[in-house]
């Protein structure tokens, strides 16, 4: 009798396992299939991104070589390809280089357009902010004070890499539009700022002295002249120094 009960219990267990298998095996198989597809998709996407980065690197190097050889047309074509194939960093650097080529040919509106696109191409402030800063300098002669201040507003925020340079540009834009008192006040704050780079603090001090001597009208033009400095050629890597980093303008 005991054997009969054990046999019945074993058969019940067997039926239960079969029902569980019929219920959950398709689910488990589906989960494994989805995981396999996701893994293959990620591998394919990663391989594609790597391939694009390699193509962008080659194109960017070709653009730099063309610039060195005095071939801006060939350089521009190469940077177009780098911007098309590259990630955000390569797009930003390539567009900044295109801006430099346009600026060298005195195509200022085109240069501003490329710099605006370069600023939007990368989420890294080390790449985006210098491009946005340089665009603001170039736009000083064609846009209103409100437009220039709107361009500079994101760059002025605490902790942004171009904070001090953007504050200086804002002061010069105000000076250009006749807001001498506001410009001087901003320059004093910049001069005394603990985080202000020494070169910017020195320029602020000189600018304040020029304003006090009645020669402040020339300062904005001096700072804007900085925008005509050719774009520096960074190393072709995502962590390369940002193109268009500001250089010290001539002293008044």
Image (cartoon, grey):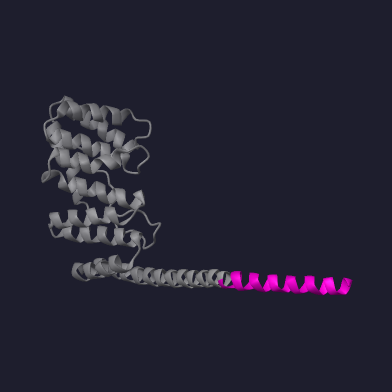
Q: Visible in this render: residue 183? A: yes
Q: Main secondary structure of the magenta part?
A: helix
Please identify the quadrant where the N terminus is shown. bottom right
Residue 115 drawn above or below residue 223: below
Q: Is residue 98 above or below residue 112?
A: below
Q: Position of residue 100 (x, y in %)?
A: 21, 58
Q: How many marks?
A: 0
Q: Position of residue 64 (x, y in %)?
A: 29, 66
In this view, the residue in front, 167 or 24, is: 24
Asked where in the image residue 181 lies, by quadrant, the reply is top left
Q: Is residue 250 visible?
A: no
Q: Which residues are magenta?
A: 1-26
Q: Residue furthest front?
A: 1
In the rendered structure, the answer to whether residue 21 lies left or right of residue 143 reads right
**In the foreground, 18 or 65:** 18
Please name the residue shown 28% across and 53% down the image: 119
Q: Verify whether residue 18 appears in magenta.
A: yes
Question: Where is residue 192 shown, x and y percent of the image?
Answer: 33, 28
The image position of residue 131, as x and y in percent, is 27, 51
Q: In the image, what residue occupies the spot 27% across and 56% down?
A: 118
On-image quarter of the C terminus: top left
- Tell whether position 50 is magenta: no
Q: Nearer the viewer, residue 143 or 9?
A: 9
The vertical placement of 98 against 10, above or below, is above
Q: Nearer the viewer, residue 214 or 36?
A: 36
- Furthest toward the right, the residue is 1
Give the residue drawn at x 29%, y 49%: 130
């Amino acid at each position: 009798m005991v054997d009969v009960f054990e046999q019945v219990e074993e058969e019940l267990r067997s039926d239960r396992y079969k029902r569980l298998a019929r219920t959950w095996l398709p689910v488990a198989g589906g989960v494994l299939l989805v995981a396999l597809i996701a893994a293959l998709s990620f591998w394919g996407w990663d391989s594609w991104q790597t391939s694009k980065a390699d193509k962008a690197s080659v194109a960017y190097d070709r653009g730099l070589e063309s610039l060195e050889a005095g071939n801006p047309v060939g350089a521009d074509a190469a940077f177009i390809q780098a911007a098309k194939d590259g990630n955000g960093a390569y797009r930003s650097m390539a567009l900044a280089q295109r801006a430099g080529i346009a600026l060298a040919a005195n195509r200022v509106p085109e240069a501003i357009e490329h710099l605006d696109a370069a600023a939007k191409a990368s989420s890294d402030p080390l790449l985006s902010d210098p491009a946005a800063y340089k665009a603001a300098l170039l736009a000083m002669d064609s846009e209103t004070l409100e437009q220039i201040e709107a361009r500079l507003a994101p760059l002025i925020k605490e902790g942004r890499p171009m904070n001090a340079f953007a504050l200086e540009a804002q002061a010069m834009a105000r000076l250009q539009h006749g807001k001498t008192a506001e410009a001087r006040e901003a320059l004093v704050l910049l001069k005394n700022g603990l985080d202000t780079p020494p070169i910017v603090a020195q320029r602020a001090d000189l600018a304040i002295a020029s304003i006090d001597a009645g020669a402040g009208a020339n300062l904005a033009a001096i700072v804007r002249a900085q925008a005509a400095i050719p774009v520096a050629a960074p190393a072709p890597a995502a962590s390369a120094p940002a193109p268009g980093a500001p250089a010290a303008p001539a002293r008044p």
